[in-house]
Image: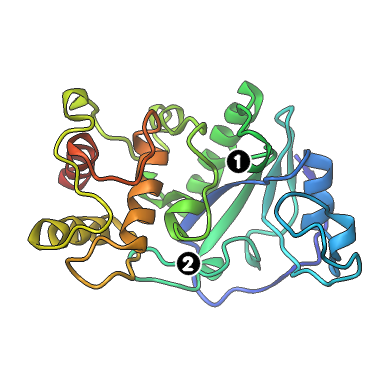
Amino acid sequence: MSTLASPNWDARAFPISLVILHYTGMQNGEIARARLCDPAPIAGRYRGPWQSPHIAADAPLSPVSAHYLVLEDGRVEGLVPEDKRAWHAGAGNWQGESALNDRSIGVEIANGGHDFGLPPFSDAQILAVIDLVGQIFARHGLGPAALLGHSDVAPLRKADPGEHFPWHKLAQAGLALWPRGGAEELAGKDPISPGDRGAQVEGLQTQLARFGYGLEDPSGVYGMSTQACITAFQRRFRPACVDGRADGQTRALLADLLAR
C-alpha cells in the first residue's frame, strides 16, 4: 500500500467504531485522488454533473478526504492516518450517534457512481476492499455491524456505494451483515408506501431505527426520511428492486437482520 499525504484532516474526538464505504463518484481514480488531497479545491478543477455548469471556475469547494482510496486496479492508497479524522461522511447519523467523521474510517472506492451510469466495481477492487476492511477490523476490534455504506448514514443525501456494490461478498468474508435471504415471493406484496400513515408505518420506523437508521419523519408518517431509509436498505440488502416502498420482502429482510 502506498501512502500519500492529504492535508485534509484534524483530530478525532471519539474512538473508532465504524468503517464507512463510499464510491468516489468521479470520472476516474486520478481525479478523485486529486480532489481528496486538495486543500483549497475550486469548482473549475472538478467539473462534473454534481455541480451546476454555470458555477464560477474559481468558486471555492469544501475540502474532503478519506483514510483510504481503492483504485480501479485494486491498488490501495493511504491518504490520512487512521488515528486522525478524515472528512468523508459529512452530516449523518447511525444508531443515534452523529459526528461520524470522528467515529469512523472512510474508504473511497474509485467508481463513477450514479452520475456516470453506476459502472461495476472490478474484482480487484472488491478483493482489495475485503483485505483492507479485514485489516482495519483486526486493528480496532470491530465486527460486521461496524461496516456501513455512506447511504446508510446519510440516506437523504447520499446513494453510495450504490446498488452494484457486492455487499454479499463482504458478508461471505465475515465482514458485513447479510440477511438469510428468501421471501422472494413477497416481493411487491402488501407494500407500505410513501404517504401512508398509521400503526404499521410507526412499526416500520421503529424497526429502521433499531437497525441504526436516523429518521426525521413524524412517527407514523411515511415521509421523505422513511422513504430514503428504505431506499438505502434496499440498495444494500435487496438491490434487485430499489423503489423506496417497504414491500413484504423488504420488511422480511429487515426483520431477519434484527432477529439475528
Task: Give the residue furthest to the left.
Answer: 199
Which is more toward the observer, 187 or 164? 187
The CA distance from mark 1 to mark 2 is: 20 Å
Residue 31 % position (x, y): 83, 46
Instruction: Of the two numbered discs 1 and 2 on the same chain, state the one appearing first in sequence.
Output: 2
Q: Residue at image x 43%, y 53%?
A: 152
Name the side, left or right, on which 132 lies relative to 103.
right
Residue 222 % position (x, y): 25, 60
Name the side, left or right, on which 168 lies relative to 201.
right
Which is more toward the observer, 51 or 21? 51
Q: Report crowding for label 2: few under 14, some 14 to 19, many 20 or more residues within 10 A (C-alpha).
A: many
Give the numbered dot on residue 114: 1
Name the side, left or right, on which 152 lies relative to 108.
left
In the rendered view, would you say 1 is above or below 208?
above
Name the side, left or right, on which 171 lies relative to 23.
left
Query: From the viewer's perspective, is the residue at label 1 or at label 2 nearer?
Result: 1
In the rendered view, would you say 94 is above or below 161?
below
Q: Is mark 1 on a helix, strand or loop?
A: helix
Q: Report if residue 78 is visible in the image.
A: yes
Q: Report if residue 176 is visible in the image.
A: no
Give the numbered dot on residue 250: none
Q: Quarter of the image containing the N terminus?
A: top right
Q: Residue at image x 38%, y 44%?
A: 144
Q: Quarter of the image containing the C terminus?
A: top left
Q: Residue at image x 83%, y 72%?
A: 60
Q: Name the residue under label 2.
A: 92
Which is more toward the observer, 247 or 28? 247
Residue 32 % position (x, y): 77, 48
Amino acid of disc 1: His
Q: Report crowding for label 1: few under 14, some 14 to 19, many 20 or more residues within 10 A (C-alpha).
A: some
Residue 205 % position (x, y): 21, 60
